[in-house]
Amino acid sequence: MTERFGGSFTQQEAIPEDAIEAAVAVLRSGRLHRYNSDDGEVAALEREFAAYTGAKYALAVASGGYAMGAALRAVGVKPGDKVLTNAFTLAPVPGAIAGVGGVPVFVGVTEALTIDLDDLQAKASSASVLMLSHMRGHLADMDRLMQICDAAGVTVIEDCAHTMGATWRGRMSGRDGLIGCYSVQTYKHMNAGEGGFLITDDDDIAARAILLSGSYMLYARHGTVPPEAAFERAKYVTPNLSGRMDNLRAAILRPQLWRLELQCEAWNARYRIVEEGLQNTPGLTVVERPDEETFVGSSIQFLLLDWPDGYVSEVLSRCAARGVQLKWFGGAEPEGFTSRYDSWRYAPSERMPASDRVLRGTIDMRLPLTFSLDDCALIARIIRAEVGAVWQSING
Ligand SMILES: *Cc1c(COP(=O)(O)O)cnc(C)c1O
């Protein structure tokens, strides 16, 4: 009998009971706005997130995209400025750059699905800021990346939407750059529906970001507060671009943060089973993970490199018929979130043949924690069988 998977690739776990209780308490209090309490849930969450990442300052905001936009403004990106970023990432990343009037300069992607450091080296002199997206949780060699950027005077902002909880040589993702940005919308590592964080050690960046987020001069009520002098320098020249987090979301997030490490382990157990099940499948390349990286396997990618036209979509439809939803970054048109640098036509770029080859073969799959380990083994068997069948038809 043909095996079929019946689970949902978009079903997250329920919000934990203690988080629900904390949320209900906020609702009963009526004090949902962060400045409606002197030291409420948002301030507590900021302290806890700063402690978790080891950053001096954490700011909770309305979304990950908002955090990136605030980061770009805080480092001084002005309309017309070029900003380096990944050719392989999701639309809110070039969107954040365009949102401040910046001009994205796309840097290629390697078979490891990380930013191409040779291409970065070649383009580093063309901009003073890199918005680095750790797309799908793959960390580039952060030592070399920082060397390149430091040597070229490029400020690094990290988009850690997929690396909350990940490390490079023991350093938390988001701590190499001047600023780290995170998302806590439903499909990320903590689920508040919408929300984000910005972290930094820099007093002036923190003060500007707090003012940007819309502090009505109540910045002393933040969880982590830079010195008054930093606010004095910024407070009359920084616009208020309201994008605060509220106490309800923060109440939902705090208990999730306390459990984040366990959740990351649960993701990795699932990841390892799928990865193991896909090893040595003819025609399929498993993405190697470097020893320096500890990742969070909330999704998995593999490559069908150099397949002739038409056959990758055959794999997708055969897997879909058996309940396995794969996303493909090589289709002619974006479907859902699978846009790529050439889809963002407001930011025209030269073609990057080596990156195009990788993207044409990049398959992506979510691994929600509602999947059991057995589910993951079944999913891997299905992919393996369908890739194998199509590969046979090409080479048979
Ligand atoms: C989700 C995501 C973001 C932005 O987060 P939002 O909270 O949805 O604004 C940024 N970068 C990547 C790679 C993402 O996946």
Image (cartoon, rainbow, N blue to C red):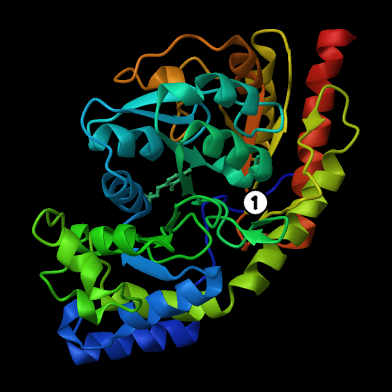
Q: Position of residue 15 (x, y in %)?
A: 47, 74
Give the quadrant of the N terminus: top right
Q: Which residue is mark 1?
A: 6
Apparent side of residue 81 relative to residue 164 in the rendered image (left or right): left
Q: Nearer the viewer, residue 126 or 215?
A: 126
> For the residue labelled by badge 1, is the local secondary structure a helix, a strand or a loop?
loop
Q: Is residue 48 above or below residue 275?
A: below
Query: Residue placed at 56% from the left, 43% from the top?
Result: 134
- Indicate the quadrant where residue 143 lies: top right
Q: Please state which amino acid type lies under the numbered disc 1.
A: Gly
Q: Position of residue 284 (x, y in %)?
A: 80, 27
Q: Position of residue 383 (x, y in %)?
A: 76, 36
Q: Nearer the viewer, residue 239 or 25?
A: 239
Query: Residue placed at 24% from the left, 37% from the top?
Result: 99
Give the quadrant of the C terminus: top right
- Indicate the quadrant where residue 183 lies: bottom left
Query: Residue placed at 24% from the left, 66% from the top?
Result: 230
Q: Position of residue 85 (x, y in %)?
A: 46, 31
- Indicate the quadrant where residue 213 lies: bottom left
Apparent side of residue 80 relative to residue 360 in the rendered image (left or right): left
Q: Is residue 302 above or below residue 47?
A: above
Numbered circles on residues, count: 1
Apparent side of residue 267 relative to residue 240 in the rendered image (left or right): right
Q: Is residue 38 above or below residue 133?
A: below
Task: State whether residue 159 appears in this view.
Answer: yes
